[in-house]
């Protein structure tokens, strides 16, 4: 599925505005991510562009997906709205999901569109993120990516349900929103942060 007004970036190397990241820093970032890939069952998110804040966010989220303390925080939650399994069970599934995911940056036609992205129901391994809303805190970007990780994990475990839909009365209490918010709090070090994941409307691809 694609969102209304979706314009994909056809060529990452010509479309992106680079930030002149030093070669040494780029190598250190890559080595740092590889160092934290020791958990073979963890979700791994990749990004092939050159936006500095996205590269740092990818580094942070891949670290978090291998952080037992983070998953223990999820396990301590009481419940998720609309979920038919416990937070502890959800945490176990995400921690051992073994999914390779990729960030896909796209331009909404309107630069005033405040949606952060949309849920890719055709291929949940792809994380669509709106370029117009990329210049925000690293922890906020991680919230968006973690939200997608929860949906992807659920898609690979269809015998359970821990998602949300348009009819959710309290979407902020569902697993994708709540775990995404927890990721933002964990990375920022601020437990008071709550940011709602703004979704793009999408239509089925024909």
Image (tube, rainbow, N blue to C red):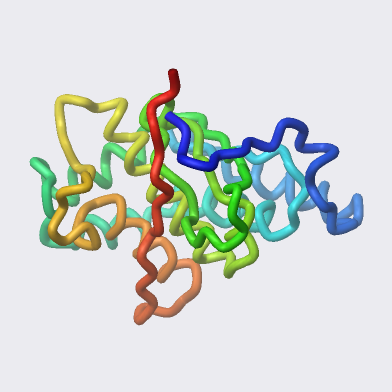
Q: Residue furthest top?
A: 206
Q: Residue furthest left?
A: 84
Residue 202 visible: yes
Percent x, y of residue 67: 44, 54
| 33 sits to left or right of 20 | left
Indicate the quadrant where residue 71 lies. bottom left
- Number of on-image labels: 0
Q: Is residue 34 above or below residue 76?
A: above
- Give the residue at x 74% y 45%: 31
Q: Which of 26 and 116 lies nearest the eye of the viewer?
A: 116
Percent x, y of residue 55: 69, 52
Residue 66 visible: no
Percent x, y of residue 79: 12, 57
- Give the residue at x 76% y 37%: 12
Q: Which of 179 and 170 lies nearest the eye of the viewer?
A: 170
- Give the residue at x 46% y 39%: 3
| 40 sits to left or right of 135 | left
Q: Is residue 164 above or below residue 10?
A: below
Percent x, y of residue 92: 26, 41
Q: Which of 60 and 80 lies nearest the eye of the viewer?
A: 80
Quarter of the image that includes the C terminus: top left
| 128 sits to left or right of 82 | right
- Give the residue at x 56% y 35%: 102
Quarter of the image that includes the N terminus: top left
């Amino acid at each position: 599925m694609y969102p209304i007004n979706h314009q994909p970036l056809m060529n990452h190397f010509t479309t992106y505005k680079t930030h002149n990241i030093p070669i040494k820093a780029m190598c250190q970032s890559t080595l740092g991510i590889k160092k934290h890939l020791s958990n073979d069952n963890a979700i791994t998110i990749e990004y092939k562009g050159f936006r500095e804040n996205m590269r740092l966010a990818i580094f942070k989220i891949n670290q978090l997906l291998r952080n037992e303390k983070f998953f223990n925080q999820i396990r301590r939650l009481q419940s998720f709205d609309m979920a038919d399994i416990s937070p502890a069970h959800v945490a176990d599934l995400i921690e051992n999901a073994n999914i390779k995911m990729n960030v896909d940056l796209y331009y909404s036609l309107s630069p005033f569109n405040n949606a952060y992205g949309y849920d890719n129901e055709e291929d949940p391994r792809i994380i669509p993120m709106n370029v117009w809303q990329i210049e925000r805190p690293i922890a906020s970007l991680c919230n968006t990516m973690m939200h997608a990780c929860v949906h992807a994990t659920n898609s690979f475990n269809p015998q359970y349900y821990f998602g949300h839909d348009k009819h959710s009365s309290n979407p902020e209490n569902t697993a994708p929103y709540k775990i995404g918010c927890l990721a933002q709090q964990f990375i920022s070090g601020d437990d008071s942060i709550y940011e709602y994941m703004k979704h793009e409307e999408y239509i089925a691809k024909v």
